[in-house]
Image (cartoon, rainbow, N blue to C red):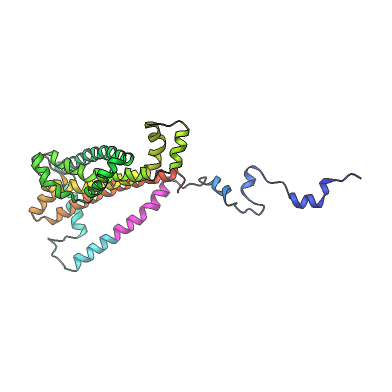
Amino acid sequence: MATDTNHDPVRSSAVGPAAPTGRAATRGGSGRELAGLDALELAGGGRDRWWTRIGRGAWPKLLALVLVLIGWQLVVWSGWKPDYLLPGPVAVARGLADIVPTADFASAVATTMRRAVTGFAFAAVVGFVLGILVARIRVLRAAIGSMITALQTMPSIAWFPLAILLYQLTEGAIEFVIVLGAAPAIANGVIVGVDYVPPVLVRVGRNLGARGVGLYRHVIAPAALPSVLAGMKQGWAFAWHSLMAGELLVTIANRPALGQLLGVYRDQSDSLHLIGIMIVILAIGLLVDAGFGAANNAIRRRRGMT
């Protein structure tokens, strides 16, 4: 007698109902979402709008700003210092409103940013080249590897007496200290990034034909990019510190700068505008940090880490 396999209870219990395909495979019969690789495959389909992401990241910063302003005003009201030495947030805001529209302020910001960008760009070139050489040449690592870290820990202001002797009171003295402050941090970021590239990636790249510059461009550089970006961020912080110290010490005629304005308002005992310039310097630092943060988030998104 022939056996009807369509009604074989053993076969039916072993195989079960046909597996759903396509969109139906993403959910079970009761509408529950699948986990594991199925959920990973569908990730990213419901991304938030860009304005939603900005709002989610902005409100903690705004809350922190409000708390700082409240604390500042409470200190002023406590009478710890007289108002002419420690003005409140409202008075400082009015002082900023007086100086921001002026041509001297615009010229000062332009001069400071030009020095910062120029010095940081040159420091990045020096740091990249030095970092790659030290990371790949053992003799150089043994010779100057620890010296790079020592240079990074040296206070930037300690370089200014030598810089002034070498370059006098010129732009060169400021740029010299910016490069010495930022380049070691960038070089260390490159060294750490190259050191932690998995050897299997290098072997795979070589097996696929990557050699020399191509190996660095397509394998080592992408793998080391997060560490390199962290080194650049730290290098910018050192460059910014060095620049502010330089502009306080090195005054160049007819070239107003933010650091120079700090010195001018200090000599005039004008704490109102002094604090205002400090806030401008802080705001520029926060904007640059936001740029590095956006670059870091872009790298994380491309690698599926967010």
Residue beneath the point at 85% across and 45% down: 4
- Does 56 appear in magenta? yes
Q: Nearer the viewer, residue 249 or 84?
A: 249
Q: Is residue 35 left or right of residue 119?
A: right
Residue 242 in the image: state x and y as whole percent: 19, 47
- Does 280 appear in magenta? no
Residue beneath the point at 17% across and 52% down: 95
Boundaries of the magenta span: 51-66
Q: Nearer the viewer, residue 271 or 203?
A: 203
Residue beneath the point at 89% across and 44% down: 2
Q: Is residue 70 left or right of residue 294?
A: left
Q: In this orientation, does residue 230 appear?
A: yes
Q: Nearer the viewer, residue 199 or 48?
A: 199
Residue 230 in the image: state x and y as whole percent: 33, 47
* Quadrant the N terminus occupies: top right
Residue beneath the point at 36% across and 42% down: 194
Q: Determine the main secondary structure of the stretch shown in magenta.
A: helix
Q: Nearer the viewer, residue 282 or 103?
A: 282
Residue 113 in the image: state x and y as whole percent: 21, 41
